[in-house]
Structures are given as C-alpha cells and as structure tokens.
Image (spheres, rainbow, N blue to C red):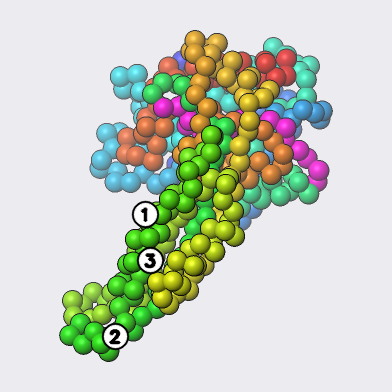
Amino acid sequence: MSQTLELTQALLSCPSVTPTDAGCQELIAGRLAQAGFVIEPLPFGEVANLWARRGRESPVFCFAGHTDVVPTGPREEWHSDPFKPEIRDGLLYGRGAADMKSGLAAMVTAAVEFVAAHPDHKGSIAFLITSDEEGPSVDGTRRVVELLRARGDRIDWCLVGEPSSEATIGDTIKVGRRGSLSGRLTVHGVQGHVAYPQLAENPVHTLAPALAELATREWDKGTEHFQPTTFQVSNINSGTGAPNVIPGELRARFNLRYSPVQSIAGLQATVDEILRRHRVRYSLEWYVSGEPFYTPPGLLCRAVGDAVAEVTGAQPKLSTGGGTSDGRFIAPLGAQIVELGVGSASIHKVNEAVRVADIDALHRMYVNVLRKLLA
C-alpha cells in the first residue's frame, strides 16, 4: 500500500463533517513537521485552519484544500460505513474520498517526497488547509488570507486540490471560476380568501412574470474563457398550507453565476429594474460568495499541464466551469491559481468513491509540479 493511499484512508476515518476537522489537520501537520515545515494552527471560532510553510524565500508555492466534508446523507443507502474506508473493485469508498481527502493526502506525500529529494529547494512550499470550505466559508480560508495579507505574507502560485478531473485523472484542470452573487428575495402581498381575490394581492402571481424574465434572460455570451452568466432559483416558499388562503408573502433564494463581463453593481441594478418594471413589491438582500478569477497561460499553467502529461501522456483541458472554490479568496493575494484533483463524478453523493490508481497518479503529478517550479 502506498503512503498516499494509507494517508487517504486515515483521513477518511475522521468524521469531519463541516465545520469539524476531527483530527485531520493533526495528521497532516505531523507529516509536514517531520519534513521541516513550520506548523501554525489558526483556529477561528469552530473552524480549524492550518498554515504550514517550509522556507522563507520567494516564490511561494502553496497547496490549498479542505478537511471538512458534506453530511453523509441516508446512511442506509451507503454500501459501507462512510467513515470506515473500504476498497472494492479498485475503488476507495468513503465520505470525502474524492472531495477532497485523496487530494490532501497526495499533496502531503508529494511535498514530503520532494523535500527529501531536494532539501535545498528554491523558494518556499506552503499549505493552507481549512475545515470551512463546505460550510459558510467565513472563518476558513477567507480569514487566513486576511491574516496573511495583514502580516505581508504572499502566495505566488497556488494549487488547489479540488476534484477537477472529468472522465480520466488529469484530463481537466481549472484555471478560474465565475463569480457567485446570491439574493434573498421577499415579495410582499396581501393575504386573503381565494374567493375574494379583489381584496388580496397574491405575491406568487405578482412575481411570476418577473421571474420568467429573469430565468429566460440572456445575461451575456460569456468570454473566450468563461461560460455565460446564469440565473437560478434555489428555493421558493409561500402560502399558509391552507388551500383557500391567498398568501401574503413569498420568499425566494436565487443565485447568479457571472462571467467577468458583468459587475456586481450592474447585476443588482438589472434585477431591481426587472422587479420594479413588473410592479413587484419586494425586499432584497444580496450576498457575494466570490468574484471571478482567472489564471492565464503562463509558468504555473505550463508546469501543471506538463506535470500531468508526464503521467497521462496528454495535456489537460483548461476550464473555468463548475462551482466556486476557496481559490476565490486566495486570488486577491495576487496568486496564480490552478485546481487539479481526482474525478468529480461522485462528490457529495451517497457511496462517494475514488479510483485507487488515481490517488497515486495524482501524487506523481504533484511531485512533478514541485520539481518543475522549485527544483
């Protein structure tokens, strides 16, 4: 059994449902400390964070990831205990196997192997690990980055170990993400009897034309590197439960995943204009989850692409698709960011799994990246 597989299994045995770390970072810190990393735990509230660094010179290469996982879902639908890793037919099962404890293990063992071979490597190697990526993402990477900025620490290159691959390991790497803007909408109406609609104001009926326009609108055509902006309703609720009562209020949550051609202020103004034009009486709260970021082809992208090709024989596809990642908090430090990890097909699902062979392949890719940048 490889050290990377062994560490992955140890991490999977920790029931680290967000924001709990459940001992994962202690396991990681122990391995890194033996390799000469300075270990700095940075807890904020209930969230465990770890900053570890070897070297004091630039450039700074940082591995970033998270130890927290989403809840298991119905335990009875799992074929084995989600926190007791099990290998079946070449797959390692467990909550967090793909997202992203195999990635964490590969980072750690790659760094340890590289340092052993290159004790006097260039620059610095760092780790930024949190237990608040699957949760609110308030006291995790965001807070650590604020601290790093305040004390003048920088990150030049960052490799996030999120599951980026599609059909095969290393076929896709993420070089950016769209922004995420969410709204909490309350539509105000007047409650009444369904037989007397003239005495009431139905917020469902009021919102419907505006919602149809928002949902079908072509916000933009995207860019060469980014998909177009999209609007999606995630939750909607209204009514008292009684079949003969017109509701007095409607509540909805929605999200805009937006390309860099948009601005937050512009998106907010467009939503407001559409609601007002349709004479919707409303209150609206906005939440910014992250702004777009993009790493153009350059030293980091070439190094990661070549590192993958040495293992797979093919250059990866560059993508900005998918949801957000903690890269959105690290990008403002001026870092180039690339995401490379195992396949994403089973993440957040019951019976989450990763191919055992992919775990060791990812380890080799990470070692190759370090060699190309810091050897």
Residue 180, compared with residue 67, is above or below; it is below
Residue 341 placement (x, y as % from top left): 50, 28
Q: Is residue 246 above or below residue 77?
A: below
Q: Can residue 170 be seen in this view?
A: yes
Nearer-N-terminus badge (1/2):
2
> Majority secondary structure of the magenta segment?
loop
On screen, residue 143 versus residue 85, left or right, reads right
Q: Which stretch did the figure color magenta?
A: 151-166
Give the left or right position of residue 35, taking residue 267 as reference.
Answer: right
Q: Nearer the viewer, residue 262 or 158?
A: 262
Question: Local crowd at mark 2 within 10 Å, few (<14), some, or many (≥20)?
Answer: some
From the image, tell me which residue sits under label 3: 210
The amino acid type, in three-letter code, at marker 1 is Thr
Residue, disc 2 = 200
Q: Residues within 10 Å of mark 3 (few under 14, many from 20)?
A: some
Q: Position of residue 359 (x, y in %)?
A: 47, 21
Q: Label 1: how many residues lie within 10 Å, few (<14), some (14-19) or many (20+)? A: few
Left or right relative to 124: residue 171 = left
Is 164 covered by the magenta stretch? Answer: yes
> Label 1 belongs to which residue?
216
Q: Which quarter of the picture shows residue 57?
A: top right
Q: Say what secondary structure mark 3 lies in.
A: helix
Q: Distance between the residues labelled 1 and 2?
A: 28 Å
